[in-house]
Image (cartoon, rainbow, N blue to C red):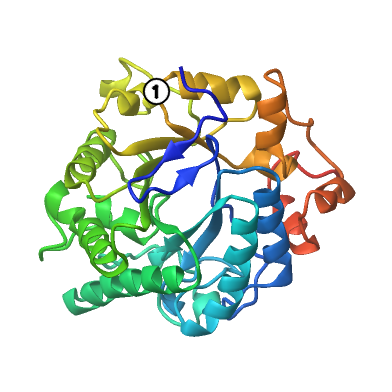
Amino acid sequence: MKLINDKITFASGLQMKNRFMLAPLTNTQSHEDGVLSDDEFHWLTKRAEGGFGITMSCASHVQEVGKGFPGQLGIFDDKHIEGLTKLTTEIKKHNSIAIAQLHHAGMRSPVDLIDTQPVCPSEDENTGARALSTKEVVQLIDDFVAASVRAKKSGYQGIEIHGAHGYILSQFLSSEINRREDEYGGSNEKRSKIIFDIVDGVRKKCGEDFILGVRLSPEGFGLKLGEIKEICESLIATSKVDFLDISLWDSFKEPNEEEHKNKSLLKHFTDLNFESTYLTVAGNIKTAKDVSKILESGVDFVTVGRSGILHHDFPKKVINNPEFKPIQTPVSKQYLAEQGLSNTFIKYMQRWQDFVEE
């Protein structure tokens, strides 16, 4: 039986001190040019101090045109290295592994934010996004790899490739969105080729001593559970990926697709043979009992979002109290400030129903 404070040893030899990873949470706190702000530094380092085994950055865009929200932390330019180095140095002081999530919003990039037409695997009438040329797809792959090199130079001990939630890599995986006729469209294997090319590039440029994860989501945005499971199996078979991060939205729900309702969405993934690859999941993991239930199901470590916002030291609280439940919401702005959220982040959290007191 896995214990919540059991260590995990990655292929590089790097050890994760417990079974808690901070989810890559949108917080809109950094500067508009992608440079790290003091607010985002404080938010993330406070979670490292609070006991997370892995402290993951928010989604960091690998191209300027891939920006998905205001105040997004960037990793597309060397000007970001100074701030990111300061961040990773402080995270590691707390014996927390520093991981950067690499991201590109694709057709979900707001026009008024990027000041140009957003891009997509295929032309999208609803968002006004234009289709990438094959040459541009190759450039996108190169920029994900370049961002991973930049991450390593900044002191990150690994990266996660964001292939979930309808952002650009997820858009490639969707047969509804991706209607390409080149090597990056058509079959599931071809639609997912972009992720495998990025994985190959990261391993080649960053070496075996660098943690590499991939985030996928199995539902929504034109994604099909069966196809995502096939991609997981193929990624595991490469032996190049240290962990898969499956974003379930709700780790305890049934699948949406009727044909897959024979078991829980979580069990569809825990039933896969992960061999030497670790599995983490995110979605509605709020209490100490939730954490235990997920780990007992066969998941290697949990990815925590909401409860990590409410309690900067959520891992410590759960380790010390197997009955721990987070504070009830809504909570006051003052309380969130005490947990390390800036006024900007608190304002963003007001979009979550019944989370912040009026």
**Camera-nearest residue between 164 and 278:** 278
279 is higher (above) or lower (below) than 216? above
Q: Residues within 10 Å of mark 1 (few under 14, many from 20)?
A: some
82 is higher (above) or lower (below) than 280? below
Q: Residue at x 73, y 70 (%)?
A: 38
Residue 337 vs residue 212: left or right? right
Residue 275 vs residue 310: left or right? left
Question: Which amino acid is tagged 1?
Answer: Gly
Q: Is residue 176 visible?
A: no
Q: x and y percent of residue 133 in the render?
A: 20, 76
Q: Is residue 266 visible?
A: yes
**Camera-nearest residue between 59 and 249:** 59
340 is higher (above) or lower (below) than 79? above
Q: Secondary structure at mark 1?
A: loop
Quadrant assignment, res 124: bottom left
The residue tagged 1 is 298
Q: x and y percent of residue 27 in the render?
A: 64, 59
Q: Residue at x 58, y 50 (%)?
A: 96
Q: Residue at x 32, y 29 (%)?
A: 269
**Camera-nearest residue between 95 and 296:** 95
Q: x and y percent of residue 6 in the render?
A: 52, 30
Q: Residue at x 24, y 33 (%)?
A: 275
Quadrant assignment, res 35: bottom right
